[in-house]
Image (cartoon, rainbow, N blue to C red):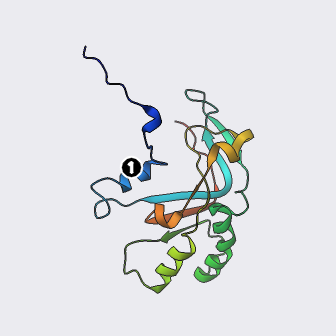
């Protein structure tokens, strides 16, 4: 077996997210569409550690000032615009399409970095802010963004 080269890990620059890997790759932007998701509150199926059993957790409401919180506060206007008081989710198209003035204004409004919640296979409620929030710009990270106000945990098969 050949020797493995020594990699000075302190010299590596790691992407902040999987979307950074795709966005910086040779296929971007014409062949990749980056879709982000968030929620304000609800339930989620996850484990407390890798390989742990799946559990259902209650998500706390999104942190004040976070992307989820901003979308939560925008929801009443979206409901009014579409005449649907029960609307639970909406999608914002940030890139592509005709790129009209409203889309540019939306991108500008979401360009400032905000905290975004990221819950995946693991969820640690006790350290939620430290473990599950990253600071990023929705407009720079995604082509479209889906906000789900209230989620319901998946049930494992």
Characterize the local packing of mark 1: few (<14), some (14-19) or many (20 or more) Cα atoms within 10 angstroms.
few
Q: Residue at coordinates 46% horizontally, 86% vertically from top-left?
A: 101
Q: Is 23 situated left or right of 90 in this image?
A: left
Q: Is 102 situated left or right of 74 in this image?
A: left
Q: Is residue 108 above or below residue 35?
A: below
Q: Residue at coordinates 46% horizontally, 71% vertically from top-left?
A: 94
Res. 127 image quadrant: top right
Q: Residue at coordinates 28% horizontally, 64% vertically from top-left?
A: 30
Res. 110 image quadrant: bottom right
Q: Is 85 situated left or right of 36 in this image?
A: right
Q: Nearer the viewer, residue 39 or 43?
A: 39
Q: Nearer the viewer, residue 49 or 65?
A: 65
Q: Residue at coordinates 63% horizontally, 46% vertically from top-left?
A: 132
Q: Is residue 55 above or below residue 114?
A: above
Residue 50, percent from left and from top: 56, 29
Q: Which residue is mark 1?
A: 21
Residue 55, percent from left and from top: 65, 35
Quarter of the figure that contains the N terminus = top left
Q: Is 155 situated left or right of 98 in this image?
A: right
Residue 88, percent from left and from top: 62, 65
Q: Secondary structure at mark 1?
A: helix
Residue 39, percent from left and from top: 62, 57
Q: Nearer the viewer, residue 27 or 123?
A: 27
Q: Nearer the viewer, residue 39 or 54?
A: 39
Res. 74 image quadrant: bottom right
Identity of the residue furthest to the top in this view: 1
The mark tally for this picture is 1
């Amino acid at each position: 077996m050949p020797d493995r080269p020594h990699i000075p890990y302190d010299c590596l620059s790691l992407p902040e997210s999987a979307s950074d890997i795709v966005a910086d790759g040779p296929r971007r932007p014409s062949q990749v569409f980056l879709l982000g998701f968030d929620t304000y509150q609800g339930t989620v199926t996850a484990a407390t550690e890798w390989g742990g059993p799946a559990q259902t957790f209650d998500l706390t409401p999104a942190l004040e000032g976070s992307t989820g919180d901003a979308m939560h506060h925008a929801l009443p206007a979206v409901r009014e615009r579409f005449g649907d008081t029960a609307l639970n989710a909406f999608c914002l198209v940030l890139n592509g399409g005709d790129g009209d003035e409203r889309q540019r204004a939306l991108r500008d409004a979401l360009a400032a970095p905000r905290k975004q919640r990221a819950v995946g296979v693991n969820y640690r409620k006790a350290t939620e802010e430290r473990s599950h929030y990253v600071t990023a710009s929705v407009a720079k990270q995604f082509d479209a963004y889906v906000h789900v106000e209230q989620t319901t945990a998946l049930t494992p098969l």
